[in-house]
Image (spheres, helix red, strand yellow):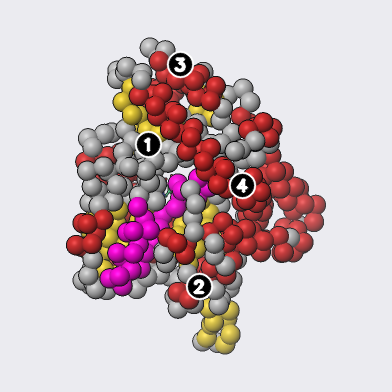
Amino acid sequence: MVNIARLRADTPGCEGQIFLDSAGSSLPPQIVVETAVAHLRREAEIGGYRAANERLDDLQAVKTAIGQLLNADASGVALSDSASRSWSDFFYSVPLTAGDRILISGADYASNAIAALQRARQTGAVVETIPSDSSGQLDLDALDSMVDERVKLVSLVHVPTNGGLVNPVAEAARIARRAGALVLLDACQSAGQLPLDVAELGVDALSATGRKWLRGARGTGFLYVRPELAATMEPGRLDLHSAQWTGPAEYTLAPDAGRFEFWECDVAGRLGLGAAVRYLLDAGPADIYAAIAERAEYLRKTLQEIPRVTVRDRGTQHAGIVSFTVDGLTPLEVRDRLAADAITVTVSHRSSTLLDMTARDLDSVVRASPHSFVTFEDLDHFADAVTALP
Ligand SMILES: Cc1ncc(COP(=O)(O)O)c(C=O)c1O
């Protein structure tokens, strides 16, 4: 069980408000803020290069901590500035030619789908969507019938941005791998709230952000690439960190996933991300994940009892995102009226998950996403505030 008093004491931002937006950008623990700010101060004292040189071991430790979280070696981790950057760094490096097939999930995030469509235009590959089953999750039978040797990449979203569903990604990855396709997992909404063992999941690559459930700084993210695969890939763009200029017409790629990184970066943000991941590891990931699931389930049940509310979550396994609509109010009106009561939720729009929202005839949904530092009293107050909406 989590020590909620400790979690809240470590998160000064949670006092005086009800914060339900860890699926957007969470409240970081104080150690994350202190770590990042201390580094910015140090940069101001001695300059960014010397300040970074003082922290080389700590920067490497960020990858080690992420590797620990993923049950992976640090050599398979590349740091970046967002989940989309990580996803596309990998995706744009997969060779594609005319007639190749790219499969995306029915609830894939817009940025991923747009990148897939662009590459299809550029290469003559085709993008196809894995249908959702009647529960709303990835249809594994349909995937099984779709895969063949022309499928070069399968994009799986672990937890879609617009609802509480957890996709059966380990099973989907098995099917894709059997057909020889690469599996790229969008773990943007699962990193920090669900176990992510890349060996068990059987994925070739995984992308995630720092600012959501991991509670790191904004502008941080990471890519995992299976090390044996990373060693064979040529990223679409290189600099003097991802490769070495070894002769007038020659260069050598970095030996590991570092070939997906550029040299310049937000060192303070990365150190903050490392502090966030260590905070999670120290608190006990299993306990944090259980606390998030428990709060989301409580919230779902509570909201279901409010007459004007429709909970929009689908799937058979649920995560920490609770999506809903309120009769007579747009999701933006709900968000803004709750904000006036010091309650933070966000809105997920049709354009973020176009296919899924269109299939469900939804324009937008309210998204409430409680982290482990949220109390059950907070959730009751939240439900009262939703009930009292004009
Ligand atoms: C499922 C999913 N994938 C990808 C992203 C993109 O993440 P980023 O904004 O860090 O690129 C999001 C952001 O909300 C998301 O919810």
Task: Give me the disc on residue 141.
Answer: none
Question: Which dot marks residue 284?
Answer: 4
Query: Could one spot residue 199 in this view of the protein?
Result: yes
Estimate the x, y position of residue 354 in percent, counting from the top left: 28, 44
Q: Amino acid at mark 2?
A: Pro
Task: Give the alpha-carbon distance from disc 2 to disc 4, as whole Å.
Answer: 27 Å
Q: Is residue 24 above or below residue 245?
A: above
Where residue 87 appears, x then y in whole percent? 43, 59
Which residue carries the number 1 mark? 348
Q: Name which residue type carries label 3.
A: Asp
Percent position of residue 295, x then y: 49, 32
- Which mark is first along the chain, 4 or 2? 2
Pointers 3 and 2 in contact (CB under 8 A)? no
Mark 3 vs ligand 1: CB below 8 Å? no
| Badge 2 element | helix
Quote the CA–CA distance across marks 1 and 2. Answer: 35 Å
Kind of element beneath mark 4: loop
Q: Is residue 332 among what the camera can see?
A: no
How many neighbours does mark 1 have within 10 angstroms: few (below 14), some (14-19), or many (20 or more)?
many
Q: Residues within 10 Å of mark 4 (few under 14, many from 20)?
A: few
175 up-or-down from 82: above or below: below
Select label 1 or label 4 by which is in front: 4
